[in-house]
Amino acid sequence: MRKSLACITAACAVLAALADPNDPQITLVGSNQGFDRVVTVRYTLDEPAIVTFDVKTNGVSIGAENLKLAYGDVHRVVAATGQGETRTLFWPAHEAWPDHRFGENVVSVEVTAWATNSPPDYMVIKLVGEDKGARTFYTAPEQLPGVGGVTNDMYKTDYLVMRRIPAAGATFRMGAPADEPGRHGSETLHYVTLTNDFYMAVFELTVGQFKNIVQNFTDVASGLSAYSSSKLCVSTETPNCPVDCFGCDVFRGTGKLWPGDGHDVDAASPLAMFRIALGLRTLDLPTDAEWEFACRAGTMSGRYDGTEYVAANDAGAALLGWFGSSWSSRPQAVGLLKPNGYGLYDLYGNVFEWCLDRFTWYTASTGSTLLAPVGPANSDTGAERVVRGDRSNANGSGKNGRSGFRYNMEYAYVATDVWGYVCGYRLVCTF
């Protein structure tokens, strides 16, 4: 990335920070604050880039939550400038940072140009309106417009918020040690190296998000007619809750199967509709290894907050997932509990989350390292797939609310009662 720094006050000079010469080159032409306290920054770009900004006082950021009202050529891919052209971003200080005044030479704006193949941590994709599929980018969740940032309800229905996961070249310990409380036999400890960064959805795919993309969808699972009123199917009005009423065979289709067909999916599948509507051809489910790496967020403990399972319905489980007494006969609205270190919510105990891999017990020994594993070869639509995250339920003790926990489910599985192993979806994509 390439950064340029400019002071808001006229007496300050424009400075350019050191950067890799292969990064997009951004040059600040000028900046000022008008009588209306709207800060205007003009710059040039030598190639298309994603542009973000920060405001600092005495070299320290004023905080991402105070930057969310910026507009103009910022938080998106900005075209390169031609001869004599400039790009402009605006920041209404009087609204975004009220009751503050700028002292001489102590307030500066830092503008950053990100290569389009190395974007910022948060990507937000619009799911409604004429500009459906439009993408904006932010360096922190607090920068997202709206009260509450990423947890605002609109990001659970009308937008898809995705977090960049820094996985390229990362080696991590996958599975669980033999003495981890709650461990199952399929969690053999081994090491995995991933090859690419990827974006992962902050929330499980919700009914509202699904309905905004997949129009006139009919719940296709047999045996659900009497159950749909108490289950989070597309036909019910529970927009902030996860979709969970049809199998992975419906979501991706049965004509194209992982890993033999790679990321190809049936053309008429809901996932294909998402790809077309949003212009994201790499949108898919995570692999088993990608899911666990993202869930752990660098931790090696049983839970991503550094704790371990202690006993049935212990207090730690209730902070991270809907188990036992915190359950109320159905999965819950997303984004209400504590996120992990990457800002991902509901990784434990809302709905199981489908992964691409066919289920098998790990065979790698503790001393070996697998490179970006994709699971066993498979051409059988009835074969079991990996699901992660556990499900919310009244009998759940929280024992399975762990980063290493994994379970097996038939590709076409659909729960037919409230005790079923309800399965949902968390989307990922590369860039």
Image (cartoon, grey):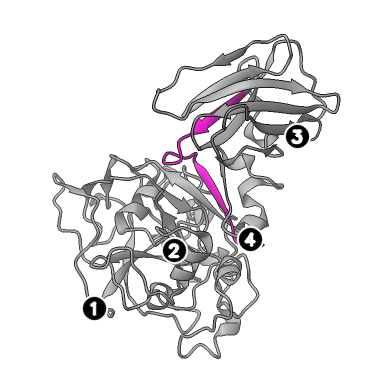
**Circles 1 and 2: CB atoms closer than 8 Å:** no
Q: Circle 1 is placed at which residue position?
A: 380
In magenta segment, residue 268: no
| Residue that appears at 72% across and 9% down | 11
How far apart are labels 1 and 2 at the CA level?
33 Å
Is 289 situated above or below 55? Answer: below
Q: Which residue corresponds to the image point at 19% horizontal and 59% vertical from the top-left?
A: 362
Labelled pair 3, 4 in contact (Cβ < 8 Å): no
Extent of the magenta region: 110-130
Alpha-carbon distance for marks 3 and 2? 44 Å
Q: Earlier in the sequence, mark 2 or mark 4?
A: 4
| Amino acid at pointer 2 | Ser
Question: Measured from the top left, where is residue 205 in percent x and y?
Answer: 52, 64
Q: Identify the element where label 1 is drawn.
A: loop
Q: Secondary structure at mark 3?
A: helix
Three-letter code for the amino acid on which mark 4 is drawn: Asp
Mark closer to the observer (2, 4): 4
Foreground pick, 72 / 99: 72
Q: How much space separates mark 3 and mark 1, taking CA atoms?
A: 55 Å
Residue highlighted by disc 4 = 158
Q: Which residue is mark 3?
A: 96
1 or 2: tag closer to the N-terminus: 1
Residue 51 at x, y percent in the picture: 56, 35
Work out how far the residue at label 3 is from the one at label 4, CA to CA, in angstroms. 23 Å
Image-based side of 357 in relation to 334, left or right: left
Mark 1 vs mark 2: in front:
1
